[in-house]
Image (cartoon, grey):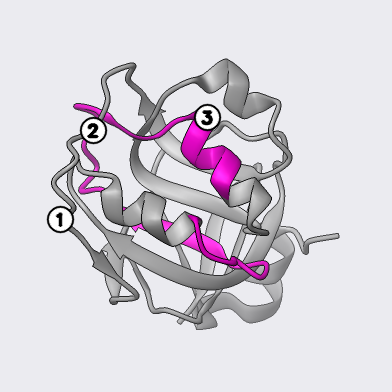
Amino acid sequence: MTAMTADLWDEQGDRLASLTALWRDFGAERRFAGPARTVRCLEDNVVLAGLLETPGEGAVLVVDGGGSLNCALMGDRIAGLAVANGWAGVIIAGAVRDSVALAALPIGIKALGTNPRKSGKGGVGEVDVEIEIGGGVIRPGARVTADEDGVVVER
């Protein structure tokens, strides 16, 4: 079982960053944790999908999508890749689609909202770079914990 974010905050305080975004839960798992892998991409999901095709080994993919809700960075097909490859969860500062199908998948998924529109396919993005979301910095390898109350990451 994943530790609760509020309990972690009480124990560790400022050693953690709380990602202050209005996260919505989309996957069947509401609580998940693991080492961070990161992607920075804006309205283009090719790099994100490519990473989820690789073994996740219990990692959490944190995506800096610029907060854009103009298109979805992940739908049921790409989320299925994450499940098949052993990712613990995906956190997207952006939109997803296929929300009903995502709800049935045994993975944690948090995003800002939904949009049925597909993303671009130019292959523009960066993997395993330091990103900032909701006032928190996420470095590759940092421990990420998510639950119904939000997301915390070790500094």
Residue range of the region highlighted in magenta in the rendering = 53-81
Observer-nearest residue: 121 or 153?
121
Q: Residue at x 39, y 27 (%)?
A: 113
Which element type, helix, strand or loop, lies under badge 2? loop
Q: Earlier in the sequence, mark 3 or mark 2?
A: 3
Q: Residues within 10 Å of mark 3 (few under 14, many from 20)?
A: some
Q: Amino acid at mark 1?
A: Val
For residue 80, above or below residue 16: above
Q: Report x, y in % for residue 154.
A: 52, 78
For residue 120, above or below residue 21: above
Which element type, helix, strand or loop, lies under badge 1? loop
Cα separation, mark 3 vs mark 1, equals: 21 Å
For residue 128, above or below residue 145: below
Read off the residue under disc 2: 119
Q: Earlier in the sequence, mark 2 or mark 1?
A: 2
For the question of whether residue 23 can be seen, the reply is: no
Read off the residue under disc 3: 76
Observer-nearest residue: 109 or 155?
109
Which element type, helix, strand or loop, lies under badge 3? helix
For the question of whether residue 45 can be seen, the reply is: yes
For residue 125, above or below residue 76: below
Q: Residue at x 49, y 56 (%)?
A: 53
Q: Earlier in the sequence, mark 3 or mark 1?
A: 3
Q: Residue at x 28, y 65 (%)?
A: 132
Q: Quadrant of residue 3?
A: bottom right
Q: Report x, y in % for residue 72.
A: 32, 30
**Marker disc for residue 124:** 1
